[in-house]
Image (tube, grey):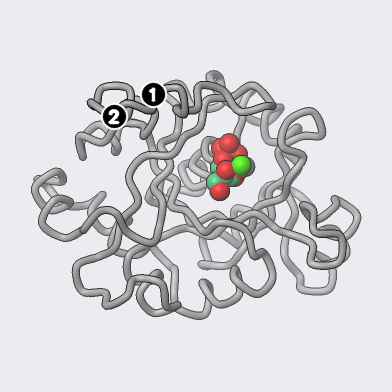
Amino acid sequence: MSLESALQSLKRGEFVLLFDSAGRENEIDMVVAAEFVTPEHVARMRQYAGGLLCIAIDNNFAKSLELKYMHEILADSSISNKEMIMGLAPYGDHPTFSLSVNHYQTYTGITDKDRSLTIREMANIFNVENKQKKFASSFKTPGHVPLLIASKGLLAARQGHTEMSVYLAQVAGLTPVTAICEMMDAETYSALSVDKAEKFAKQNGIPLIDGKELLEYAKVH
Ligand code: 5RP
Ligand code: CA
Ligand code: ZN
């Protein structure tokens, strides 16, 4: 599947599957541009991915919202259990988790309708002039959708699904805010294998992007 057809899918508000690499998480995330997310997208990610549904955002956007990484927030706090703070994951990257949020118009925050509203409204903030003020008045934390902050320097700095999905949105000319969810396997109780993901992609007409190809593309663009 060419990268071009994957970008076209994203622009149409459709899913793409994104594999990082065998030497990293070795996982495939379902990815969709946040600006298009509907309750149906959330339902499909629950059913066919089943991992943690998160919102990945561009680093500059996070700065404009005065957001920090959760490990920084906790390190700066007065909690006594600082040894619990995750520095690096077993595969060597720092976590990209920041706050978790609910849009203020949600009820429990977890339903397909509620999470899709939270995800879409995060993307909409990108086009607002006073982003920080609008963010603080429109969202509550803790909530049911974790925010992930892409690294400054994007793919040159970190090659996670956070950065790769935000990069894809940028290249597609979309708001650099994505909804991502790891694909799990209910038969093996592990992450879905690349073989099974390829089969799923073919059956459902969803492009599968190999992180290696994306990194090659980024090098020359
Ligand atoms: C949040 C995660 C996922 O792995 C997600 O893909 C983002 O993380 P990363 O950028 O490290 O791949 O842990 O559910
Ligand atoms: Ca992970
Ligand atoms: Zn990941």
Q: Is residue 128 left or right of residue 147?
A: left
Q: Is residue 13 above or below residue 87?
A: below
Query: Looking at the image, which residue sits at the far front?
Result: 80
Q: Is mark 1 within 8 Å of ligand 1?
A: no
| Amino acid carrying mark 1 in the image | Lys
Query: Looking at the image, which residue sits at the far right?
Result: 195
Residue at 23%, 26% in the rendered image: 78
| Amino acid carrying mark 2 in the image | Ile
Rendering coords of residue 59 (x, y %): 36, 32
Rendering coords of residue 173 (x, y %): 44, 48
The image quadrant in which ligand 1 is located: top right
Q: Disc 1 marks which residue?
A: 82
Residue at 68%, 35% in the rendered image: 214
Q: Is residue 201 left or right of residue 45?
A: right
Q: Which mark is residue 178?
A: none
Q: Is residue 4 above or below residue 81?
A: below
Q: Disc 2 marks which residue?
A: 79
Determine whether label 2 and label 1 are within 8 Å by CB.
yes
